[in-house]
Every structure is written in C-alpha cells, then in structure tokens.
Image (cartoon, helix red, strand yellow):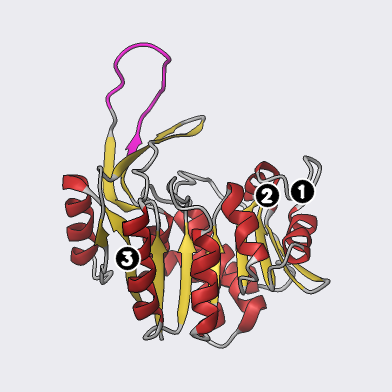
Amino acid sequence: MVVLCVTLNPAVDRVLVVDHLEPVGTVRPREVHVAAGGKGNNVARALRLLGTRVVTTGVVAGLPGEWLVAALRREGLQPRFLTGGGETRTTCSIVHPGGTVVLAEPGPPLDDVTTASLLHHYRALVSVCEFVVIAGSVPSGAPGLIEDLVEAAGSARCPVLVDSSDDALGEACAAGADIVKANLEECVGASLVGANATASSAALALVAAGARAAVVTDGPRGAAGATGDSVLEVPALALDVRSTVGAGDAFTAGLVAGILDGGGFTAGLRRGTAAAAACCLVPGAGWFDPNVYSEMLSLLDAPGAS
C-alpha cells in the first residue's frame, strides 16, 4: 500500500523548546528541532514510522522549498513536489511550560498556471497510489482546489481523507470526501457547528454536510468518528504532555494506517489516538517513538480503557 500525502501549503517547521516565555526580552531555546513541515508532510512522517509507504507532493518555492524537498528525501518520504513562485513559508512553534505558541506565516499564493500543473501532476500520482491524504491549509489564489482534488481521487477510485480548516473544510464535505478530519476548534471556526458542540455532534455535522465519514478530535477530551448516524467515541489517554505540535497529524496517520491494515474505522480511531498520545511525549511535528506508540495502543486495548 502506498499513501499519497498532499501538502498544499508546506513549511519549514521550527520547534523551539524554552524554559520560560516573556513578552519582552531575549529567550534562548534549550532545544531546537527543524523539519520539513506542513500537515501533509507531518502525516507522511508519522505514517512511515508506522510502516506505511508514502509519497509526498505539493508546491514549494525558493531556497526554503529546495531545503524542504531535500529534507523529505533524506527521511525517505519520496518527495514529488512542483516548484512555484515566491518562497516557502516558515512555521515557528514555541513550546513553553504553559503550552505552545505557533507562529504560522502565510504561504505564497498559487497562480492559475501552477494550480493547473498541480492538478495534472496529482492525477498522475493518484493513479499509482491506494489512498490519498490532503492535509493543511490552502494557499490563496486557488478557490475550489480541494473540491477538484477530492473529485479527481474519486474518479480514480482512490479513497481520500481531507484534514483542513476554514472554507476548505466545508468544501471537502460538499465534495463528498471519504473521510473529513478536523479538530473541534476548526469545526467551530468554519461555522459548521456552534460553540457548544462536542466532538460527537461535530462529526455528525460533517457527515450531514456531505462527508462519507468524519473524525473530530478534541484534545484531552478524546475523539469521535461518525459514519451515517452512528458515532464512536474514543477517550484520550492521560499524559504528561510535553508538546502538542503535530499530534493531530500523528492521529491522522494512525487513523489511515488502521484502516489500510484491515481494521476498519474503529481500529483507525484507536490507532490514531495512540499515535497522537505518543507524539505528545516528544517535541517535533509528526515524530514519536514506535515503541511508545505500541505502549499507548496497549493501554487503549486494556480492559476498561474505554
């Protein structure tokens, strides 16, 4: 099985771990982690840790884009990126004792020529893959791109999962994506549910909006998956969280791996929860120790765990 991971708005990810964070002054990180990021690339990294073959694609630009592709290649994530205009963005996550602050630059816009080239390139890659993950934000200049990508995967009879936010989240549902995944905050931000929604009600709302299945995560309160009018809830594991950077992407990877391994939606939700938990124990987007992941999965499978 080969999974195509699409990152429309890739980034050079910098994770800085600090002992304190002040509004004014100089803070010197005690740890710095730099990686080829963007949600689709993070998902690919986590999938490879779970033993799944991946191909990565999207659009990069400038010297940061060249670095990003080289970094993906070193990790064995099989980059097949196109080159566009501008400069690939940088995302900086500051992990401090009180939580995590993420500074996310906007990515360069996509022009019509680059968008058309991307769609042609994507269709060729979909034809030789068994599953597609489209994850992350969508650059400006390409309205309707998510719908086009979902429809192209459907035409190739290739299941597609979309993990995005804002208008792209609604577009993925309307296009009938096989799975739409988001966190609860993103569902509220996209005006798909109200402020008092739960993960379960939000997952049902995504299905009602057109998604064939939906998964909504809600941090320490766990996750919920919906197919039709059926909902399955999976509790989060109690953890001493070190960093939440990339935990949602690790969840997506576990979800996909569980489905592809034949366990179905239920196994996918449990494996996603275990992968996200393992990711929360280390800094860096999409990284985790596979042995710790196995321990987390065992905890979920223990009698009385859910």
Taking depth in this image into account, of 291 and 143 the one nearest to the observer is: 143
Residue visible at 47% across and 31% down in the picture:
97
Residue visible at 36% across and 30% down in the picture:
18
Q: In the structure shown, which secondary structural element does the residue marked by tag 2 occupy?
A: helix
Q: Looking at this view, name the residue that lies furthest to the top.
A: 24
Q: Position of residue 232 (x, y in %)?
A: 75, 69
Residue visible at 25% across and 43% down in the picture:
87
Q: Residues within 10 Å of mark 2 (few under 14, many from 20)?
A: many
Is residue 24 part of the magenta span, yes or no?
yes
Which comes sooner in the sequence, label 3 or label 2?
A: 3
Residue 193, label in figure: 1
Residue 187, label in figure: 2
Choose mark 3 or mark 2, whichever is in front: 3
Q: Position of residue 14 (x, y in %)?
A: 31, 41
- Residues at circles 1 and 2 in contact by the CB criterion of under 8 Å: yes
Residue 117, label in figure: 3
The C terminus - image quarter: bottom right
- Residues at circles 3 and 2 in contact by the CB criterion of under 8 Å: no
Q: Position of residue 26 (x, y in %)?
A: 29, 16
Check disc 3 and give the amino acid type: Ser
- Quarter of the image for residue 129 reads bottom left
The N terminus - image quarter: bottom left
- Does the image show residue 280? yes
Is residue 286 part of the magenta span, yes or no?
no
